[in-house]
Image (spheres, rainbow, N blue to C red):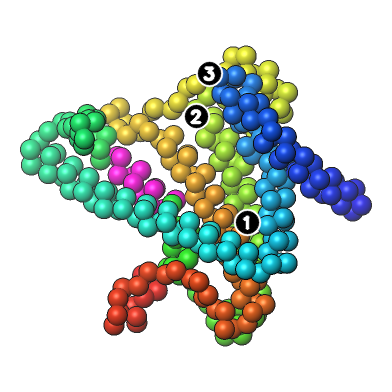
Amino acid sequence: MLDALSWLVTQIGLGFYNLFFAVTHPSLWLDWSDKEALMRFVYYGASVEFFFVVFDIFLVVTLIGLIFRPFMWACVRGLEGFANAVGRTAAWAGLIMVAQQTLVVFLQSIFRLGEFTIAPLGLGITQSVGWWSEGLKFWNAVVIALCVSYTFVQGGHVRVDLIYAPLRHRAKRAVDMFGALFLMIPPMVLTWMYAWFFLWRHLITPKVSASDQLELMLRKSSIVKWNVETIGFSPDGFNGYFLFKILMLCFVAMVLLQAVAFFYRSYLEFVEGEASADKYLDRDSLGEGEEAYEGTH
């Protein structure tokens, strides 16, 4: 137990050092013309060291917020505003998906075209109808990955409240704080670790894995080269599947940021009482007279 506590304290202290070192030596991990810098970026992107850097930032921000409550409210508004901005923008992918599907149906079923070109502003892309058809999955993934936090802020997720609903205000906020810290963050941390290396295994060769040590990855840097995955499920199908792996990381990042915002909001509403419920919450409205239908989508 003492060894574990000592390790935790040591890692927290090293997190501040590693953050300062990374900020003051960006060329060691951002100068990708140096293959060793690229491999350092890959290694540290899902490492224990990176976790404690993020954890230290969370601790500092939380401590400041506990001392100066308006700062914590500002963090809540900023994080929720970011989730709303990203979600409201990404939601337009649904319209693109509908337009693309309509175009595919007309050009394939009516005009019998095998391929077609889209060239907005003179920047054209020519692909087969099969490529455009399979590409609909990408827009669907954009909506799912980037609108997840937005939907959470808007209260649009499906939930079944058997125990939570009858609880009093502060009991609900306590449950929310527990859920944010122990039910949202840990699964997303694990997902990030595996999704990070899953992405890079399809961007560079030789392949990397979560079990590789830094020394091994630096040795691999002498033969590393870009090898972006461009293989589709069918010969003429959508071949940008590495974009889905990037969206996986975006999904995890959005949920992690929302977990922090939700924890902060729950704590503030717990401390300030029922009068602070939904304070500063920016939710979309269907308009006057439609309040009964809001939150049911």
Q: Compared with residue 219, is residue 96 higher up or lower down, i.e. above or below?
A: below
Residue 162 seen in the current view? no
* Badge 1: residue crowd in 10 Å (few <14, some 14–19, many ≥20): some
First in residue order: circle 2 vs circle 3: 2
Residue ID for mark 2: 202
Residue ID for mark 1: 185
Which one is nearer the viewer's eye here, 288 or 246? 288
| Residue ID at (57%, 79%) | 276
Q: Which of marks 1 and 2 is in front?
A: 1
First in residue order: circle 1 vs circle 3: 1
Name the outermost residue toward the right.
Answer: 2
| Residue ID at (51%, 75%) | 278
Answer left or right for 287 relative to 211: left
* Badge 3: residue crowd in 10 Å (few <14, some 14–19, many ≥20): few
At label 1, the amino acid type is: Ile
Q: Quadrant of residue 286?
A: bottom left
